[in-house]
Image: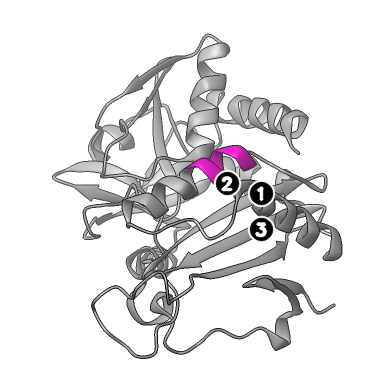
Amino acid sequence: MTRTVYVNGEYLPETEAKVSIFDRGFLMADGVYEVTSVLGGKLVDFDGHAVRLERSLGELDMGSPISKEDLLDVHRELVRVNEIEEGMVYLQITRGAPDDRDFVFPDPDTTPQTVVLFTQNKPGLADSPAAKKGMKVISIEDIRWGRRDIKTVQLLYPSMGKMMAKKAGADDAWMTQDGFVTEGTSNNAYIVKGNKIITRALSNDILHGITRAAVLRFAQEAQMEVEERNFTIEEAREADEAFITSASTFVMPVVEIDGATLGDGTPGRVAPRLREIYLDESIKAAI
């Protein structure tokens, strides 16, 4: 079935959707994005994604071309017409398409922003086999720009990182800066030592994950100890458990880091329990 997508106010078959070659998202990676999961035909953590979208736009001195209410309507309509039970809705907003390529920002009064949304159908998203066996990660140097807290479409290095992992026979890469783990290529990173969950504190160095915020809240409500601080790959290799969080993987156990097996090489106790709690609570609160 051909997907229906949304481009600048219109619902179109994906085969008819077009964006200008002068769009700054294409030429300059001058845009931001969000990905919202769909479970049971409903949106997970939509409000959190909408708030972060506004922040990302503001940090890049961009206005918001669509209201939160209208954005919710578009998400729901795309989920409906594309019959998505489990999957994702991808949203991208760029600074628009001026008449020609220029490093200088175009006048927002004469150059409307570009708004694109599309769905991805992912049956079985909540019951992923990977969550039962865990994933393997490698470490790579973090050479991205300094404002990783802004969810921009500058995803070349994360893509390269995933390919480095694939070449090494792993599933993903954790990036390091000054000897400390920042985050995964498209996720936040955690280790577990004893009964303590350890993850890097929020700053410009990492994305302020929406799933991260929810999982840490649920962990504290479940009387789990959380410590937000830097940790090294060496510390991670000696941890009892490790895991990642993201909108598309929820909570995913990590069982190997740079060839070192964690525990007995299977998901431990904390990550599966957090995944269970997160999915239960998110499905209840989905809209």
Work out how far the residue at label 2 is from the one at label 3, CA to CA, in angstroms: 10 Å
Mark 3 residue type: Val
Mark 3, Cα crowd under 10 Å, few <14 / some 14-19 / many 20+, is: many
- Disc 2 element: loop
Residue 265, can we see it? no
Give the position of the N terminus as an image quadrant. bottom right
Residue annotated with mark 3: 89
The segment highlighted magenta reads 46-51
Q: Residue at horizontal 47%, vertical 41%?
A: 255
Classify residue 273 as left or right of residue 23: right
Name, please, the residue furthest toward the top. Answer: 223
Under mark 1, the amino acid is Ser
**Image x and y of residue 124, in percent:** 77, 52
| Local crowd size for mark 1, using a 10 Å CA cut-off: few (<14), some (14–19), many (≥20) | many
Please say if the residues under marks 1 and 2 sit with CB atoms less than 8 Å apart: yes
| Res. 37 mark | 1
